Image (cartoon, helix red, strand yellow):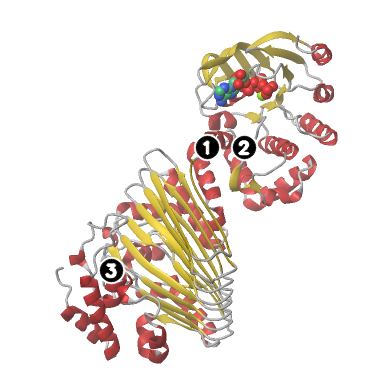
Amino acid sequence: MALEVNNLKVEVDGNIVVKGVSFVIGDKDVVALMGPNGSGKSSLALALMGHPRYKIKSGSAVLDGVDITGISPEQRAKLGLFLSFQNPVDVPGLGVETFLRQAYNSVRGRMGVMDFHLLLKDRMSSIGVPGQFSSRDLRGFSGGERKRMELLQMSLLNPKIAILDEIDSGLDSGALKDVASELKKLSAGLLLITHYIRMLEFLRPDVVHVMKAGQIMRSGDFRLALRMDREGFG
Amino acid sequence: MKGLSRKIVREISDSKNEPLWMKDFRLRSLDVFMKTGFPRWGPDLSGIDFSRLSYYLSPGSGKSSSWDDVPAHIRKTFDKLGVPEAERRFLGGLGAQYESEMVYHSLKKEIEEKGVIFIDTDSALRDHSRLFRRFFSKIVPPSDNKFAALNSALWSGGSFVYVPEGVKVNVPLQAYFRINAQGIGQFERTLIVVGENASLNYIEGCTAPVYSSPSLHAGVVEVIALKGSTVRYTTIQNWSRNVYNLVTKRAHAYAGSVVEWVDGNLGSKVTMKYPSIYLKGKGSRADILSVSFSGKGQVQDLGGKVLHLAPGTSSRIISKSICQKGGSSCYRGLVYVRKGMAGSRSSMRCDSLLLDSVSKADAFPSLKVEEKDVELMHEATVGRVSEDALFYLMSRGLSQSEAVSLVVLGFISQFTRELPMEYAVELNRLIRLNIEGF
Ligand SMILES: Nc1ncnc2c1ncn2[C@@H]1O[C@H](COP(=O)(O)OP(=O)(O)OP(=O)(O)O)[C@@H](O)[C@H]1O
Ligand SMILES: [Mg+2]
């Protein structure tokens, strides 16, 4: 069992926005999480990664036998957890390659500057990230570009469990296909947060959860996702 | 003021066998110093110990006598930076000589063949007296401020650079190499003259901390950029935390010339420095780019000043300051456009980044514009490191302090990009050390 979340409650800004959520993601499972805007999906994701504003009030999250609720985001990353952000953050002036190299070195162990450069170039081309992006600052990327950059980071850090918060939003249809096929290649357990069926058609989730007002109201297989897509969350 | 007297000043001058005009200049400067009050604004200078001035630098003076006298935190920094033993001794203020002297000599030979003069200021007075006298103190008169007067009375050491008409010095001239051979003076005097259509890239200082036992450094730098020339003067200041560093830097830019001050300030207890550029010739351009880092107990009082005294001139002032652990920074900027100087442009921008809530940053930008046909921009921001940015970086496996470092390095990247590679790398490493703690 790679990630086991038990009765998790998350508070942000004085409000409980995740009200006791439980699920598991097995080693190479694809788990989809759907639900209306504001239902608490991102809050759950951020709390799992350790954002200081999204406080875990109770419950546990166990990654390969280790309860991660009390440890720093840095340590969670090193244990193999990854979050692809719904809204990736700009860090003006920070060179993309410098950032990625440091992240890689922290999570995967030291690699020489030149070797890393070659690895990066290789991953960029397979994910379809334009070559010049690595010499840019971490700012000003378009919505779709940001999502590809998130995927690039995931591919470099090679996590055990990846939470992908709307990685499909903002992607054009070609990009969506690229991203999906790249995700298939990576051997991580996935929590796919999405509003759209397209990505799920490519990735065929084993389990689908539907969250509403901070709780998982329903769970099922891919057919549940199809129904939600057709009928809405009701 | 114990010890500081006309007699001392005469002795300094005599011991160097200076011409009468210089002795006279020093004595008049001393009078000015005595008559001039402390600046009525700015940081607290009451900690300066005027009784412990070391008046001039005979070889070996003004330095620590042994490695053990160098403060432990500085020695520790050298360890962390992996600075070789010989360099540590120099940087620790011990003035040991090592290979850089040879680098200096070979560089010197190369540029001398083009007619460039690059020597210490005392030698310039002796060996190039006419040239020297023509330009010396023409830009910063003793009356400019109390510390310029003190420097004028007591100056010793510093660099003299003369680049003849049309000569381009492509390799950056590094005072570091010259100073290495001679030690750092307390009242350095630097004079740079760049001839018509010539160019110079001059670098002073180094990134590793420099320990100085005298706690007051009052330097004066004068730069003259003749028609069509280009000068960039880069300083990295990293004095030990006991030093009051009060510097007067000024340049005159003639028609079509470009003057750039690139100024990084990490060390010292108090630094006061407002590099200025007088745009005296049509179409001349000024660029002042500065970065400061203030930690515990440090005050960085910095800024830039540009006077548009000719039409069609342009200027840009960019200042970035970072404060942590109770350090404080203050930016003072002035842009003046004289009446009739049409078609001039200026932009001033000052950004501060506070790493905690006990540090502080102030900004006092000022614009004095007498001309209508000008384009001006000015912006000041004070920010904190965003929690979301830190979290984002940490979610990629970086520690909190690594994440803060990356945000800070990003914040000053506009500055770092202007430095030669090895300085940029060192500066980045040093800022990381400062943030990540000892
Ligand atoms: N930093 C915050 N401060 C205050 N309220 C917040 C904050 N973050 C989230 N919330 C609130 O928590 C609730 C859940 O938000 P969350 O972002 O988790 O929703 P979501 O399910 O991801 O929605 P969407 O599908 O629109 O992305 C919302 O009501 C939101 O306004
Ligand atoms: Mg969301």
Give the image location of residue B369, x and y in percent.
49, 63
> Is residue B293 found left or right of B52 in the rendered image?
right
Give the CA distance from mark 2 to mark 3.
48 Å
Element assignment for label 1: loop
Q: What residue lies at 65% left-to-right and 31% top-to-bottom?
A: A85
Give the CA distance from mark 1 to mark 2.
10 Å
Q: Would you say the residues marked 1 and 2 are in contact, meaning their CB atoms lie under 8 Å apart?
A: yes
Quarter-wise, where is residue A199 in the image?
top right
Mark 3 — residue?
B146
Say which of A109 and B316 sits in front: B316
Mark 1 — residue?
B386
Element assignment for label 3: helix
> Is residue B88 found left or right of A170 in the rendered image?
left
Q: What residue lies at 53% left-to-right and 44% top-to-bottom?
A: B407
Residue type at mark 1?
Ser
Q: Would you say the residues marked 2 and 3 are in contact, meaning their CB atoms lie under 8 Å apart?
A: no
Is residue B58 visible from the viewing direction of this image? Answer: no
Q: What residue lies at 36% left-to-right and 39% top-to-bottom?
A: B358
Give the CA distance from mark 3 to mark 1.
41 Å
Callout 1 crowding tier (Cα within 10 Å): few <14, some 14–19, many ≥20: some
Give the image location of residue A163, x and y in percent.
67, 25
- The quadrant of the image that shows the C terminus of chain B is top left
Label located before the other in sequence (3 or 1): 3
Is residue B67 visible from the viewing direction of this image? Answer: yes
| Residue A89: image tag | 2
Please state the chain letter of the residue tagged with numbered disc 1 in the rendered image. B
Quarter-wise, where is residue B197 in the image?
bottom right
What residue occupies the far left of the structure in this picture? B2
**Whereabouts is ligand 1, in terms of quadrant?**
top right
Callout 2 crowding tier (Cα within 10 Å): few <14, some 14–19, many ≥20: some
Please state the chain letter of the residue tagged with numbered disc 3 in the rendered image. B
